[in-house]
Amino acid sequence: MRDAAIGAHGALGKVVLALDAVSRRWLRRSRCDPHAGEVLAVAERMGGGGVCALNLIYDWACTTAVTVADGCPRMLRVLDWGLPGIAAHSVAVARDGVAGRWLAITWPGLVSVFTGLAPGRFAAAINQPPNSDPLRRLALIAGGDGVPAGHLLRQVFDAAADFESAVAMLAAPGLRLLSPALFTLAGTRPGEGCVIEARGMRRRLHRAATHPGGVLAVANAWLSDWPGRPRAYAAGRGEGARANNARRCVQLAAVARDAAWQEAALAAPTLNPKTVHVLALSPATGDVAARALDRGSIVLGPTRINAGAG
């Protein structure tokens, strides 16, 4: 996965190696990230560069929707990442935390969690919000302050006993994130769905039940009035970032409202050449419907997993 990611861009290898040294120093100095040592252990075992940088990289687009209107909440998730070749290395990893077993949809050697399902508890995913100030992020890394969003989400899957506990952990102010994040969660009971906006030590909570039809969709723009320019990562030629984000949200929300939805109902721009994962997560039943794509072609799946079956 590392070799595929670095080889996807001609100049990326040198950039990753430079970022790897910075990332390694941050992980060694980190005062509040319990997973820093694990990343360093993976890097030492693999040898070569790139492991630390890829574990802290935060550059993708996503569209996520949670529906709470049809009894059992459900999450639909489309993950875009502009690193051709990585989709074929996708894995579903079962992990055991103090709150029980859960499933991470991830890649080998990646300590962060961007999409996961805890059967009988909740499902959660991370979207990247508008561009953050790169100088501020470098200052946070240089100072050893803050926690990567993907590491925080992993802690939540390990420790949160239910949906509301997960919301409380992610929505609690006071813990600084290295980069802003949009956390989407779905629970097991009617009304359990939300999006949490996180920026530095600030949080804003949006409940799906208060939105039309009980469906809440988010792409790469703030739901609130926080400043920032929406990402155009998945935008087509001639389409602005705001219009692209709005179209992706409308399309995925429409699919989420259909209890008998089919993957074929998804189209551009929600699906695009950088899409790597398409997932439907049902926390109440533990069911996961998944497929992995590379440049629009399916390389893994469609696959169905029951995360509660062991």
Image: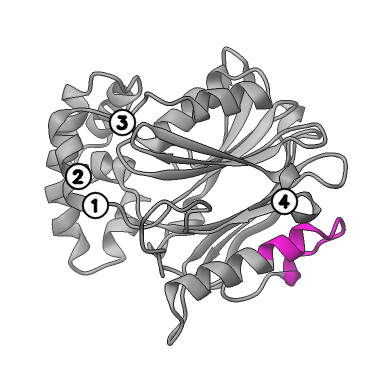
| Residue 308 shown left or right of residue 183 in the figure | right
Q: Is residue 66 among what the camera can see? A: yes
Closest to the camera, between mark 1 and mark 3, is: 1
In primary-sequence order, the first of circles 4 and 3 is: 3
Dividing the picture into quarters, in which one does residue 42 lie? top left
Above or below, 228 relative to 93 = below
Q: Which residues are magenta?
A: 252-265
Q: Residues within 10 Å of mark 1 (few under 14, many from 20)?
A: few
Q: Which residue is mark 4?
A: 211
Closest to the camera, between mark 4 and mark 2, is: 4
Instruction: Please provide percent x and percent y for residue 228.
Output: 36, 58
Is the Cβ of the residue at disc 2 closer than 8 Å to that at disc 1? yes
Instruction: Please provide percent x and percent y for residue 179.
Output: 33, 43
Above or below, 268 relative to 78 = below
Secondary structure category for the residue under label 1: loop
Q: CA distance from mark 1 to mark 4?
A: 30 Å
